[in-house]
Image: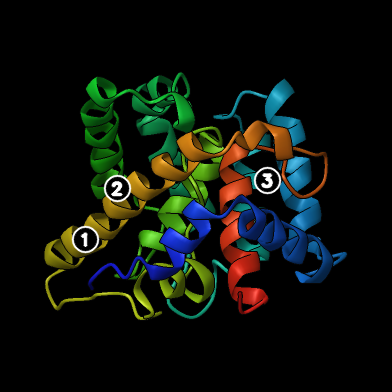
Amino acid sequence: MNLKLEKFNRLLKSKELFEKALRTTKEEYRPLDPGQYLYNLLLEKRIVLDIFSDEYLELVYTTLISWNMNARGAKLSEIGKFKETIRKNREIITKLESYKLALIRDKDKEEVISMLRYLFFNLNLTERKSKLVTFSKTLHFLVPELVVPIDRKYTLDFFYSNRQMPLSKNQLEADKKQFQIFEELFDKFIELSKKYELSSYLDKVWHIVPTKVIDNAIIGFGKGNL
């Protein structure tokens, strides 16, 4: 898949367009959606709970299901296996908690990508070959200041004009192709986070963390055909 940056460059160059996209998401995207309610609850609970506790990881799992991550090409691993694989990687996930997307320096980026790559290849979150979307959303719930959630309908269409996930008969090859997409998008998300003061758009309902501001701008761009 080849990056197509026309939409991204328009969003990057126009603060007016960026803010219009955010308004579109607020006004038109899934009002009173249970997934939005669970997501807000998840980030509230994250402040007071150990993110590796049963309560938090079960809420992560439930929120993923509400975000359609247990259907079609994204069948989740069984809940026990899901919690176990995250806990096995507690040390790396905890290290990633210290990073914020907008504050990543060039000298830090290689280390951050290296840790994310390790998690991508070692977290067993899904039973299907297509793991990019489930991985990005799970990591967003675990390290929300760092990882932007990715989906097919809006994110992949925005950056690639293609909603199909690159797959291969060989699982390792499929993983390599999908992590390449993750890394490409991670770079673009950093660029957006340094262009706009994302914290100025935060609220208690739609834009709870800066990474979700980026996601909502992309959703709004697609939703409003901007």
Mark 1 highlights which residue? 175
Residue at (40% x, 79% y) in the render: 163
Q: Can residue 77 be seen at all in this image of the molecule?
A: no
Sequence-first disc among 2 and 3: 3
Residue shown at the point (30%, 30%) measured from the top left: 112
Give the amino acid type for the residue marked by disc 1 in the picture.
Answer: Asp
Classify mark 2: helix, strand or loop.
helix
Q: CA distance from mark 2 to mark 3?
A: 21 Å
Q: Image point 44% across, 52% down: which residue?
A: 136
Q: Quadrant of the C terminus?
A: bottom right
Spot occupied by residue 155 in the image (x, y as percentages of width and height): 47, 66
Tell me, for residue 59, which label it has, or none.
3
| 45 shown above or below 192 | above
Q: Secondary structure at mark 1?
A: helix
Query: Contact (CB < 8 A) between labels 1 and 2?
Result: yes
Residue 95 locus on image (x, y percent): 39, 20
Is the Cβ of the residue at disc 2 closer than 8 Å to that at disc 3? no
Amino acid type indicated by mark 3: Leu
Q: Which mark is residue 73?
A: none
Residue, disc 2: 120
What quarter of the picture does the N terminus occupy? bottom left
